[in-house]
Image (cartoon, grey):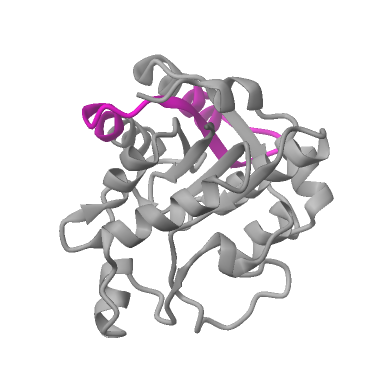
Amino acid sequence: MRGCFVTGTDTGVGKTVVAAAIVAALRARGDASVTAFKPVVTGTDEPPDRDWPPDHVLLARTAGTTPEAVSPFTFGPAVSPHLAAELARRPLDPRALRAAFATAAARAEIVVAEGVGGLLVPLAADYLVRDFARDAGLPLVIAARPGLGTINHTLLTIDAARAAGLTVAGVAITPWPSAPGVIEADNRATIARLGDVGVATLPALPRADVALLAAAGATLPLDRWIGAAAS
């Protein structure tokens, strides 16, 4: 199985945009069959955004599948997955999460999976996103912010991943400004040097348009990320 697992330094850092851009770009260039997977989506009760649909809807749109196929477990409150499941009295079972991923992976040759929040977010009481990423067996792509604070957050995420034996394929900083300042440029260089990792950038996109996502994703080092060997 080929693919990657998109995680982030925090929630709201652009993981879904990065994952959708990867999927859209792979499909646009006529790559082998590609699918997307996100084990859990929370916050479905939030007011709709005209330009950016919920994560599983956006990923489904880029992958040409259904939201239900992308994310088997959805919850209304915008809280951590383990709490959302607890509030709904539907606790998440790691075995069910792994089985859902296996079903999705069987449908395609390339799987682009996306986590929930950061690597140490609990999906269940004793099962973290990091555990799920390890079970998925895919190399990591870390979505990170461009501004102040991102060096610490990104290097901590890299360390947490490698400590668990995960392969870090690269970092994607987003939304990357059209005219990066000295802080953004230094952040990128410092993460690459101290993290011993390739750092790509993804520009801000005005809306969830598949063509725009594909064009942006085509600038990413897709072959290196997808072809990276997982531990």
User: Where, by quadrant of the figure, is residue 34 drawn?
Assistant: top right
The C terminus is located in which quarter? top left
Q: Residue 46: give x, y in percent of width and height.
A: 52, 81
User: Where, by quadrant of the figure, is residue 83 drawn?
Assistant: bottom left
Q: Which residues are drawn in magenta?
A: 159-188
Residue drawn 40% across and 38% down? Answer: 150
Residue drawn 82% across and 33% down? Answer: 29
Q: Is residue 163 visible?
A: yes
Q: Residue 21: give x, y in percent of width and height.
A: 68, 44
Q: Residue 38: give x, y in percent of width and height.
A: 49, 56
Q: Residue furthest left?
A: 126
Q: Would residue 158 appear left or right of 31 to someone viewing this image?
A: left
Residue drawn 56% across and 43% down? Answer: 112
Q: Is residue 14 visible?
A: no
Note whether 10 is above or below 5 in the view shown.
below
Q: What is the number of callouts on the image?
A: 0
Note whether 79 is above or below 123 in the view shown.
below
Note whether 141 is above or below 34 in the view shown.
above
Note whether 62 is above or below 176 in the view shown.
below
- Look at the image and say whether residue 127 sits in the magenta stretch: no
Q: Residue 72: give x, y in percent of width and height.
A: 48, 67
- Of residue 26 and residue 183, the one placed in the foreground of this image is 26
